[in-house]
Image (tube, helix red, strand yellow):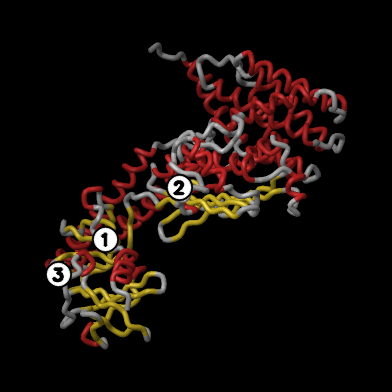
Amino acid sequence: MNKLSSREQEELEILELFLDESNTLFHGLDNHLMKLGEEPVDQELLDMVFRKVHSVKGASGAIPRANRLTRIAHELESSLAKVKDREFVPDEFAIDVYLEAYDCCRHLLSLLDKEDDEPSEEMVGRIENCIFNLRMFTQRNGNQGAESSSLHGNVEKQVVSEGRRIVLEEEEGMTVTNEKLESFMKVSGEFIVLRNYFDIFYSDITNEFDRDKIKAKLDDFSTSLSKLTNNLQEQIMSIRRVTLGRSFTTIPRMVRQVSNRLNKLVRLNMEGMELGVDKNIAKVLSICMTHMVRNSIHHGIEAPDKRVAKKKPETGTLSITAQESQGVITVEVSDDGAGISRQQIVNKAFDYNIIPYKMDHPDFSMSDEEIFDLIFNSGFSTADHVSDISGRGVGMDAVKTAVEGVNGKVNVTSNDGLGSCFQIQIPVPKTVIVEKSIIVKSEGTFMTIPLKAIAQIVMADDLVVGRVNGMLTCRYMDKTIHLASYLELNDPSYRSSYKNRMAVILRYKRNYIGLLVDSIFDQLETVVRPFDSVIDNLKGFKGTSILGNDQIAYVISQEELVEGLMKRDRL
């Protein structure tokens, strides 16, 4: 590889800086442009959009290969200036043109990062057509009627490309691979293991030598190391996570494009978008949203006249909600459309030879869950015609494949005439976890129990103990609860003794159990390493942790332990 001259190196650095700044400025700009169509008199919104476009246009002038980008950004800026001056009020068509200009700019930015940076003939035509329309807005102060047809064809074509490719947002700042993040997490975990080891060493040294100078230095070192590990852990956890709002930034644009193409009126509601999720999960959910949103608009929400005939508002509602609870991320896509026809699904499945009987056959026996699950078969579609929006039968299959790839599941519910709901549930990815815990020993085994799971610690001899169906029980908060060793969950025949032992009262939701232990040691932060697939079925535990003396401890899962015993023996 030839070494770059100082001038070439300088030009490369300028280009990289320009691309980074421009992509940051353009991030989410399409959503702001759509909002401009709804609130054209919002001066703060106008100023913000205008500044972004103006900044990109100005900076592009310093890039030799950015002539087309400069031209289209200039025309967009000029048109927005008319809007700012109240000389032009953008209508639906004008917003389409602005969005087309945005797409062209993003495409040209992506080409600048490649050696072969010339756009295709089709793209050149789109750019010139867009520039022409923008000039018409500027010159004719919004009398844009005659030109609309040619551009609308381009916008409709763009619906296809937007749907087929998932564009995740450009992240501000440095790009970090998931492999590196995972390595960082492991390193931070080793820091904590080292700190725990040092705490034991520190205790031994101070007790043995009792030298004030050594003690002071070691104390300072311990404090600094603690701050370092906590800070490192917090930073890495924040790097791994991205808000769904950033991941779903293309959805409002997609809803607008698809609904316009199908001549439907759709209102989009999005809740819980502040939820932060692992970047891998965000990518999967973005892929799923593309297919599910398009399907809801195409197959679910009715045309305005049909909705009015059913005494519904002519504007349909599409809702996307997200939440995380007890280690599970739940995202729901629901609509108030026609619902899913069970009869139609069964008939199509029969035609595809997926099932042996139709609904009217005496041997037909399928639950709603089984019927709805048919739509996830590869190639399955209830559409009569294939369009560029949906109908090829690959969308829902892709959703299920993507979700199951991250150990998730998809559930479907539907009410005829009222709408449907697709629910995605994905467990929070297993990785290195740090928890504040106590160390205990039971039946010769070291275990750690998360502090957040502990309601109380008492001597078992002080409890009112009894037996129900041979199982130890005790009274706690006016309830009869299980009193058991961890061994009883994995070996139902095992019977515990409570004499001279302690009971750690664990809580999960509104349920409690008393976990019998022999000894309680220290309280510390533990690094939780999830089990691999070989020993993933050890009930009541979620992983292991290495203590400061290199002893391996099993990490209690209060969810599994409490629910496991509750399900096995109902009191």
> As displayed, is residue 510 above or below residue 535?
below
User: What is the spatial separation of the Cα atoms under label 3 and label 2, in whole angstroms?
Assistant: 39 Å
Q: Which mark is drawn over residue 91?
A: none
> As displayed, is residue 60 above or below residue 92?
above
Q: Which residue is mark 1?
A: 541
User: What is the spatial separation of the Cα atoms under label 1 and label 3, in whole angstroms?
Assistant: 15 Å
* Residue 152 in picture, x, y percent from top left: 73, 27
Most distant residue in the top direction:
2
Q: Observer-nearest residue: 387 or 382? A: 382
Q: Observer-nearest residue: 268 or 394? A: 394
**Does the residue at mark 2 contact the one at mark 1 (Cβ under 8 Å)?**
no
- The disc, 2 or 1, on the residue closer to the chain's N-terminal end is 2
Q: Which residue is mark 3?
A: 443
At 26% from the left edge and 56% from the top edge, which residue is drawn? 543
Q: Is 215 positioned to the left or the right of 304 in the image?
A: left
Q: Which residue is mark 2?
A: 241
* Residue 153 in picture, x, y percent from top left: 71, 24
Q: Badge 3 local density, few (<14 within 10 Å), some, or many (20+)?
A: few
Element class at badge 2: strand
